Amino acid sequence: MSMHLNLFIMGCGHHRAAWRHPQSAAEKMGDIRHFEALARTAERGRFDAVFFADGHAAGNVAGGPLWFLEPLTALSAMARASEHIGLISTISSTFYTPFHAARLLASLDHISDGRMGWNLVTSMFDTEARNHGYTAMPPHAERYARAEEFADTLLALWDSWGDDALRLDRAGSFADPDKVRPINHRGEHFLVDGPLTVPRSPQGRPVLFQAGASDQGCDLAARYAEAIYAVAYDLESAQDYYRDIQARVAAAGRSPVPVMPGLVTYVGSTMDEARARQRELDELLPMADSLHQLGTFIGQDCSDWELDAPMPQLPPLEEFTGPKGRYATILRIIECEQPTLRQLLGRLAAGGGHCTMIGTPESIADEMQRWVEQGGADGFNLMPPSLPSSIDDFVDQVVPVLQKRGLFRREYTASTLRGHLGLERPGA
Amino acid sequence: MSMHLNLFIMGCGHHRAAWRHPQSAAEKMGDIRHFEALARTAERGRFDAVFFADGHAAGNVAGGPLWFLEPLTALSAMARASEHIGLISTISSTFYTPFHAARLLASLDHISDGRMGWNLVTSMFDTEARNHGYTAMPPHAERYARAEEFADTLLALWDSWGDDALRLDRAGSFADPDKVRPINHRGEHFLVDGPLTVPRSPQGRPVLFQAGASDQGCDLAARYAEAIYAVAYDLESAQDYYRDIQARVAAAGRSPVPVMPGLVTYVGSTMDEARARQRELDELLPMADSLHQLGTFIGQDCSDWELDAPMPQLPPLEEFTGPKGRYATILRIIECEQPTLRQLLGRLAAGGGHCTMIGTPESIADEMQRWVEQGGADGFNLMPPSLPSSIDDFVDQVVPVLQKRGLFRREYTASTLRGHLGLERPGA
């Protein structure tokens, strides 16, 4: 049994205050060398892939960068700075036309020699919609219907060239016209004749990731995803999600799909050292800003609460009228960890509701092993609080322990992302 | 006086039959190493830039490839395989949303350390429209109105971050919110709030190329283009275009803009050797196919005409009811070169109505010098009939002659595409 590991790249790291560290990469958000080095570090750690989230609106520019470079162009350069590792870009089905997306991704699958994946998302924010011609975001159900049609259209475009369509017969034809077919898609949201301008790519088609969370999202993932990102605060919630999503996958008539929850790690040679790493970042948080954010999460003004006292009791989930997912996570963190207000702000500052493991390489490997052996995960989507330092720590210290236990590959045995994930190459 | 040189990359070369040559790159249309090597060759020749055309529909797949890889993703890899040369992608204002285009191009300007350019086009074909949600192409005037608004919107998005917007003050703010502004564009074709997700790029903004040919196209170029691609069959038509476009540029209140006509070259150590190179490619043309194509160009069935006899007289331009631009070029070739039918098919097979220079390095350098000294061009957009062989010939044989005469740079003196073209960096 070998687990899967992805590096989820977020400019300076997933901790909101990471860029404030004196040695942070804050100056390098537009420097492709920084991102190439991260891909090489993950490749040195024999990871399955690196992964970019995406968004279509500038966030709070004062508070810090979420991303800068457009992921597809960044991943092309990163493909050429690496040899084995998979490269996964988020693609918004809300804003791209299917033809653009299919073409960009297929080109990248050629450029990377078969290492490309895409994370299908629906965009969420009105600020994003208003950058792409809409006055507001379409409703949730419509966005999911569009996402489904988007996926169907991309799959059809990638299959519009047969695997053996290229003849390159110098005295005859370049390609076989009978094996390059229009798709003539006429749907609710898209009109696409095809065929694609790019012949079938090394993996047949790029690997489809999805991160289903809502009921509709889970159903979309169950029908289309070849690998799934998940949010799980602890093993119990990971197991619940895993059981539910694999049941939906089975109901869709498909074989089990690898599931990778997000994971924030703080590694140290002792537990104290690991905790010190976490504290070092937490202490960089501007308190007024963090208190204001927590206030919006819990629907109360907490600006004058005592920072180093235990968190006061919050009203139960049923009584809370705002967004429930994050509130439920906050209640769970308070119940399980009994944090001070300051500690809670730190927990929420890195990875939000994702699992956080703090400890020695051995204790973190123990925990990861437990998740994989007890049906909570097939691997993890690493969300290093600080980049590059936290991923250096993980690759140098945790990966060797996992390898020693036979839980993770020592060398790549495949040359494509599909190969790393144990997925078959689909026929056209 | 130093001229500007661009390499216009077309997979196997600009000659329609180039891919049929036994040593052609036909197998490498999806191999980024082929394109990286072309960028390095052009950089060895101290070219200003490499350039990709683009299209959004698969052409005649039997007859041969026009392009495969999507240009923006290909250019990202090529940026990292080179150090100085500019990188120019065609962008369709008909199919991209301005936010996608601005973001992709700005990211590439960061990734390339300030070497990105874009060639603004309107798409033309219904087959392309039907890949992006339209049932047919919008009318010419509407496409140009959209292109103009598209350019305005991209320029505004690139100026939405001030040059000094990034503070990176670890105890304070990441960026200065007062220097990152929405653009709140509400136009006939686009709604875009901004700001962009990418801060101002090394060149301020990527260099805008245009290839105005129609009256509306020339006006668009005159108002927006920082460099212009042109089609000129001979020096006289180049001079006519040059005078006209620079008058329009002046009328728009702008300084003269570099103009680069397309140029096909066949280089040999003797004229006979150069002609043999051309003949070698022409002989690869499938005759039935070429005759059928010529028939559609001239509106007559010429399938049983004598291949090695001089071209018969064709009706004058006024009597021709089909597309007049290409027909006029054909009349001019017949008048000036008195070709046989076979020779005419060869001429039309590489570069269409663009200038073709055939000869020794010295005679081609003479001709290029004449064009530049006599007000026909500020440089050339090289369209090598076969790639990589024709660009190797040009770089190894013609460039040294131009350099010796002081007509072309021996070393790069700038690090950005703007610098190579002698353009100022615009303020935000």
Image (spheres, coloured by chain):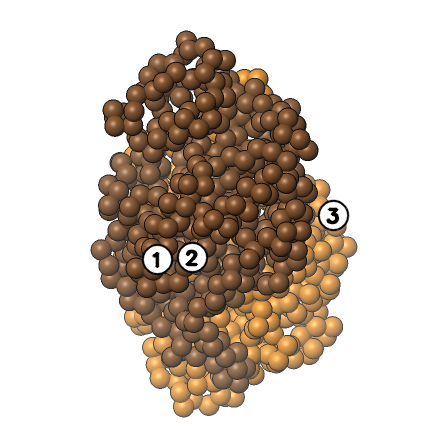
Chain colours: A brown, B orange
Q: Amino acid at mark 3?
A: Glu
Residue named by callout 1: A249
**Horizontal relation, residue B172 to residue B80: left or right:** left
Residue A391 versus residue A329: which sits nearer the camera?
A329
Q: Residues within 10 Å of mark 2 (few under 14, many from 20)?
A: many
Depicted A43 relative to depicted A159: above or below = above
Say if mark 3 contacts mark 1, CB within 8 Å.
no
Say if mark 2 contacts mark 3, CB within 8 Å.
no
Between tags 3 and 1, which lies in front?
1
Between tags 2 and 3, which lies in front?
2
Residue named by callout 3: B411
Disc 3, SS: loop
Q: Quadrant of the C terminus of chain A?
A: bottom left
Q: Chain of mark 2?
A: A
Q: How far separated are the C-alphas under marks 3 and 1? A: 60 Å
**Same chain, labels 3 and 1:** no
Residue A395 image offset from top left, x and y in percent? 65, 44
Q: Chain of mark 3?
A: B
Q: Is residue B391 visible?
A: yes
Disc 2, SS: loop
Residue A251 image offset from top left, x and y in percent? 30, 59
Q: How far separated are the C-alphas under marks 1 and 2? A: 7 Å
Q: Residues within 10 Å of mark 1 (few under 14, many from 20)?
A: many
**Same chain, labels 2 and 3:** no
- The residue that appears at 37% across and 50% down in the rendered structure is A243
- The residue that appears at 64% across and 26% down in the rendered structure is A272
Q: Which mark is residue B34?
A: none
Residue B126 versus residue A386: which sits nearer the camera?
A386
Residue named by callout 2: A257
Q: Amino acid at mark 2?
A: Val
Disc 1, SS: helix
